[in-house]
């Protein structure tokens, strides 16, 4: 073994040294921490406060927690309601199902604006929601204090998340490098009834309903009763939220395009 | 006093988690033991079948709460094999770095808990203090201190931030000095040696018979380390030695773990140097797009199955801080794994308790079980 | 030797108090109030209250002292929140324990369950009535005060075993058995180490023993006895590395597993009372009590209450040594502890007794000077 102490050396050989050695080590640590203990007094001194970062020197005074160490922390979310497009992706990607889309003022009556409401009693701070957010309006901040006396206060409404955003806490600067889901929305034309539900609910308004020619009635067959329109998706605007798929009454939209 | 059964657990200071060790004692002598696990069973394997491949990672962190990244790595390796994806070289090194930082954190945590079982309070806090440095580094690039959610199928979530490698080297220098201090307090202490020498002996053939792996096996003199024997990630490209001891007792396990920490520091220095000089992507370039964000399956089940993807199975084994962990992932198409199965090293190590506990004293149970390094999260899954 | 004792002070105090109250009363009541019986009764009461308050206060400050020292040993600060540097933290803790419900197990033996902690506490308190604190302020000047203090000190295993047995808990029982075995094993070297001191001093009176250390403190010539005494005292106080009876790793909390609330506080306080007694005994027997060596400048010893101040400083320093040991050594095992106690400690203690006898025979040590004549 590379260890300084040989395991075959027996402690009976020099009993005084074998007791004095650990005691001397403890005394050395005592002398060090007498002037500079490695702890801070938490509620009064905070690690995220730059003044105290350098105080957390371990013994020899080597500062830790310097630089952007703290800023990458995944804490409470910040939501910018103004840029939220109600795409539902954060709620979809949440593995804990702690995000619910709730109506916030600002949308028109036909298209109510929905923003995420997060239950921090369930949240695991995995950051999947902020990774998924196509507009970058849901991010994670360094705030970590959540204790309340009521369980209901653990549920952060969009307005409360927006307040977190306004405090301008450092946001997690690390952005994911993984590619976004770039499947396309495809249509199964025979099933479509041209109902406009997908275009109506699309958060980015990237679906337009185009007229299609009404087929001639063949003898002995009836022409299907439907609106002769079909959705066309503008792929560059689409954020792949899947809202159109979930509202389609005939299940004629589906994912496709990538392998 | 005739012999009696006592329950050490599920709520007991010795257990370090939620499990029960039933002990039949005569005075202070142990006549029989019966480890009972299962109090922390959360059905992670079954839940995984209902999760997107990337969402399973959040469960892996909860598998072992002191070695989350090692378990993420384990799962990711077999998931990538099942999905026929090859990660880029830089992510191999990043994952190696994760593994070794996690090994450092886990072993320091083991040290802290182990010495506290012996009644040593101050090394416990030294250990927790030094582990916090490692956790600070992990937080620096993963964004969390315990549940990292860092690895992704096909790579890792993000590259290390600028200046990280220099900070990491500083911490490694610091930790190298601290390991000497740990030895002063434990290996150089007469009472520690009197307590631990010749305690909890589990010989090599018993280890093999019970499937005991990891530091316990190496402490019995068996040179078995998956990082050498079946290299994964970048372990075939770094230099290190396998820690070995031949006492097969608690002191030998202490020696092995301490040496492993030194080797981890050695590996980390090489990896950090490599990362400094070889920039590149941290995720695979030819990654199926549906494995990108958002990770959750979109739409209802019916639509998912329309996506065809080559089927496959993946098997991986990883030298986790506690021993050899193994994972088996079956991909039957679709966005969920069809079946996920894990092999926990600690489960086997605990199951052999009868071999290494009977015949010792009640007061020996905490150091012996401490030297096994139990993480109930992965035993019960 | 005529010294002011704590009792004589409280006697004077109560006589003055009763005289003042009696002077405004009719003669019959005045006579009854100022009779020697009434004064004695009040004096005992005042004596007890002063003693209780002083020892409790010291104990609580001692706990604070240990917490702060341990904190620095462990690279942290210890209690910081309540009061300046956490000085009032233990009062807050005590208040919390006082407010808690006392829960006893259903199958527990009620009488023993409550008798154990109370008696443990009381027996630890009584010792403070015996220990001298300073030349002007020793509590009770008894000719056999050392013997009496050690006798009461060794009652503890009995009470511990009673409370452990009546808790009806396997861990408590094991802790109680360990406690009894350990304390009995370490009584012997403890007393033998004391015998060494008594041989040199020739007296069982603690005040005389301190007085006999005026030439040199006993820790130098009787170093072996000091080591044995400190080690045995650690075992008697049940502190790490000898805290097996309450080894929390395997026995949860040992013999006080089932105790909560104020009963637990009794055990806790009594443990620290005993730690205080142990530290005081070390100071009295080996470190010269309240005296300082003659080469110390007179200014340091002439201010009022200097004796008590130096006595407390020494006591807390000795307790600091116990804390240092606790911070750096692991716990030993029962069989090892007993083997060390019977096989190592007793021979060492006997050796120290022989050394003390040799010292008394030789009478003069080259560097240190001469032993005072026996019985001086």
Image (cartoon, coloured by chain):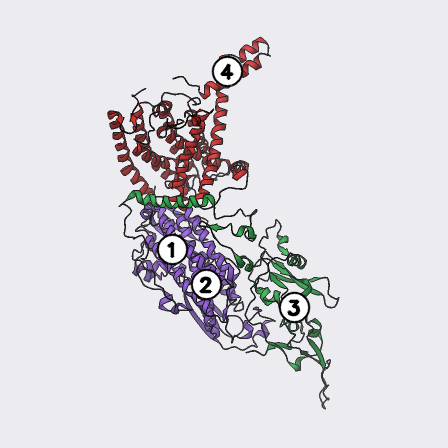
Chain colours: A green, B purple, C red
Q: Residue furthest bottom?
A: A219
Query: Is C18 left, or right, of C222 in this rendering?
Result: right
The tag on residue C39 is 4
Q: Nearer the viewer, residue B336 or C71?
A: C71
Q: Nearer the viewer, residue A115 or B308?
A: A115
Decide if residue C77 is in sight here. yes
Which chain hosts label 3? A
Residue C162 falls in image quadrant:
top left
Which chain hosts label 1? B
Query: Circle 3 — which element?
Result: loop
Query: Circle 1 — which element?
Result: helix
Which chain hosts label 4? C
Circle nearer the viewer, 4 or 2: 2
Measure the C-alpha gap from mark 4 to mark 2. 78 Å
Q: Which residue is mark 2?
A: B98
Measure the C-alpha gap from mark 4 to mark 1. 68 Å
Tag 2–tag 1 contact (CB < 8 Å): no
Q: Nearer the viewer, residue B103 or B37?
A: B103
The crowd level at tag 3 (other Cα within 10 Å; few <14, some 14-19, many 20+) is many
Residue C314 falls in image quadrant:
top left
Q: Residue furthest right?
A: A109
> Which quarter shows the C terminus of chain C?
top left
The tag on residue A87 is 3
Query: Is C104 left, or right, of A22 in this rendering?
Result: right
Measure the C-alpha gap from mark 3 to mark 4. 89 Å
Tag 3–tag 1 contact (CB < 8 Å): no
Circle nearer the viewer, 3 or 2: 2
Measure the C-alpha gap from mark 3 to mark 1. 49 Å
Tag 4–tag 2 contact (CB < 8 Å): no
Decide if residue C330 is in sight here. no
The tag on residue B372 is 1
């Amino acid at each position: 073994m590379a260890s300084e102490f040989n395991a075959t050396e027996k402690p009976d050989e020099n009993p005084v040294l074998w007791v004095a050695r650990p005691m001397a080590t403890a005394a050395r640590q005592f002398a060090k921490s007498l002037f500079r203990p490695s702890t801070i007094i938490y509620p009064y001194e905070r690690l995220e406060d730059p003044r105290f970062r350098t105080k957390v020197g371990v013994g020899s005074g080597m500062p830790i927690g310097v630089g952007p160490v703290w800023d990458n922390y995944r804490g409470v979310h910040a939501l910018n309601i103004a840029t939220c497009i109600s795409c539902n992706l954060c709620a979809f990607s949440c593995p804990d199902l702690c995000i619910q889309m709730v109506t916030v003022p600002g949308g028109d009556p036909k298209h109510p604006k929905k923003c995420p409401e997060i239950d921090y009693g369930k949240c695991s701070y995995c950051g999947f929601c902020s990774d998924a957010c196509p507009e970058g309006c849901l991010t994670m901040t360094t705030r970590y204090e959540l204790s309340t006396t009521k369980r209901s206060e653990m549920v952060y409404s969009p307005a409360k998340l927006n307040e977190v955003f306004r405090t301008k806490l450092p946001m997690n600067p690390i952005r994911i490098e993984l590619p976004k889901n770039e499947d396309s929305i495809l249509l199964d034309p025979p099933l479509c009834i041209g109902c406009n539900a997908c275009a109506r609910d699309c958060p980015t308004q990237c679906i337009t309903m185009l007229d299609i020619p009404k087929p001639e009635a063949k003898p002995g067959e009836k022409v299907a009763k439907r609106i002769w329109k079909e959705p066309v998706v503008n792929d560059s605007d689409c954020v792949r939220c899947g809202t159109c798929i979930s509202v389609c009454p005939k299940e004629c939209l589906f994912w496709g395009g990538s392998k | 006093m005739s012999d009696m059964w006592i329950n050490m657990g599920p709520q007991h200071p010795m257990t370090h988690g939620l499990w029960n060790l039933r002990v039949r004692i005569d005075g202070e002598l142990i006549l029989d033991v019966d480890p009972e696990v299962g109090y922390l069973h959360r059905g992670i394997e079954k839940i995984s079948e209902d999760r997107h491949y990337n969402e399973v990672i959040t469960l892996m962190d909860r598998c072992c709460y002191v070695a989350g990244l090692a378990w993420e790595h384990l799962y990711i390796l077999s998931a990538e094999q099942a999905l026929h994806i090859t990660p880029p070289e830089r992510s191999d090194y990043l994952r190696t770095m994760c593994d070794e930082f996690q090994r450092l954190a886990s072993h320091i945590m083991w040290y802290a808990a182990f010495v506290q079982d012996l009644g040593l309070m101050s090394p416990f806090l030294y250990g927790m203090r030094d582990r916090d440095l490692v956790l600070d580094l992990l937080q620096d690039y993963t964004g969390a201190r315990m549940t990292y959610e860092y690895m992704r199928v096909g790579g890792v979530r993000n590259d290390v931030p600028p200046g990280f490698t220099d900070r990491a080297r500083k911490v490694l220098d610091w930790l190298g000095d601290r390991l000497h201090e740990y030895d002063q307090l434990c290996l150089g202490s007469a009472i520690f040696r009197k307590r631990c020498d010749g305690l909890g002996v589990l010989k090599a053939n018993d280890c093999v018979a019970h499937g005991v792996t990891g530091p316990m096996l190496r402490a019995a003199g068996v040179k078995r380390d998956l990082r050498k024997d079946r290299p994964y990630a970048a372990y075939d490209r770094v230099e290190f030695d396998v820690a070995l001891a031949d006492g097969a007792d608690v002191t030998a396990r202490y020696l092995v773990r301490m040496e492993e920490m030194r080797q981890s520091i050695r590996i980390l220095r090489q990896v950090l140097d490599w990362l400094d000089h070889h920039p590149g992507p941290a995720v695979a370039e030819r990654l199926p797009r549906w494995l990108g964000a958002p990770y959750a399956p979109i739409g209802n089940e019916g639509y998912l199955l329309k996506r065809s993807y080559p089927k496959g199975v993946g098997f991986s084994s990883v030298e986790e801080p506690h021993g050899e962990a193994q994972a088996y992932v079956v991909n039957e198409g679709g966005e969920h794994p069809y079946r996920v199965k894990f092999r926990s090293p600690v489960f086997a190590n605990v199951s052999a308790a009868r071999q290494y506990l009977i015949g010792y004293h009640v007061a020996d149970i905490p150091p012996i079980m401490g030297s096994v390094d139990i993480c109930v999260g992965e035993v019960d899954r | 030797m005529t010294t002011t004792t704590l009792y004589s002070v409280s006697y004077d105090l109560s006589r003055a108090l009763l005289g003042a109250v009696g002077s405004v009363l009719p003669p019959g009541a005045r006579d009854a109030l100022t009779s020697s019986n009434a004064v004695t009764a009040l004096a005992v009461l005042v004596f007890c209250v002063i003693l209780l308050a002083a020892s409790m206060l010291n104990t609580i400050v001692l706990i604070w002292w240990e917490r702060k020292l341990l904190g620095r040993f462990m690279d942290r600060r210890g209690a910081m929140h309540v009061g300046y540097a956490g000085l009032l933290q233990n009062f807050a803790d005590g208040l919390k324990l006082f407010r808690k419900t006392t829960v006893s197990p259903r199958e527990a033996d009620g009488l023993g369950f409550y008798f154990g902690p109370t008696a443990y506490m009381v027996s630890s308190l009584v010792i403070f009535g015996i220990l001298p604190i300073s030349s002007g302020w020793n509590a009770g000047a008894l000719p056999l005060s050392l013997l009496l203090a050690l006798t009461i000190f060794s009652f503890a295993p009995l009470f511990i075993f009673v409370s452990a047995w009546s808790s009806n808990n396997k861990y408590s029982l094991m802790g109680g058995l360990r406690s009894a075995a350990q304390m009995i094993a370490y009584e012997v070297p403890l007393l033998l180490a004391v015998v060494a001191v008594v041989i040199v001093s020739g007296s069982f009176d603690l005040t005389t023993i301190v007085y006999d250390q005026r030439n040199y403190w006993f820790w130098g010539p009787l170093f072996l006895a000091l080591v044995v005494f400190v080690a045995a005292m650690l075992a008697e106080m049940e502190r790490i590395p000898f805290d097996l009876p309450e080894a929390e790793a395997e026995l949860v909390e040992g013999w006080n597993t089932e105790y909560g609330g104020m009963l637990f506080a009794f055990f806790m306080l009594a443990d620290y009372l005993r730690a205080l007694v142990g530290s005081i005994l070390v100071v009295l027997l080996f470190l010269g009590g309240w005296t300082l060596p003659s080469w110390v400048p007179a200014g340091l010893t002439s201010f009022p209450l200097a004796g008590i101040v130096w006595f407390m400083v020494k006591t807390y320093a000795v307790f600091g040594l116990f804390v240092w040991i606790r911070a750096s050594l692991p716990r030993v095992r029962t069989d090892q502890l007993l083997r060390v106690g019977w096989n190592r400690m007793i021979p060492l203690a006997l050796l120290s007794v022989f050394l003390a006898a040799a010292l008394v025979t030789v009478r003069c040590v080259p560097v240190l000077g001469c032993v005072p004549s026996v019985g001086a």
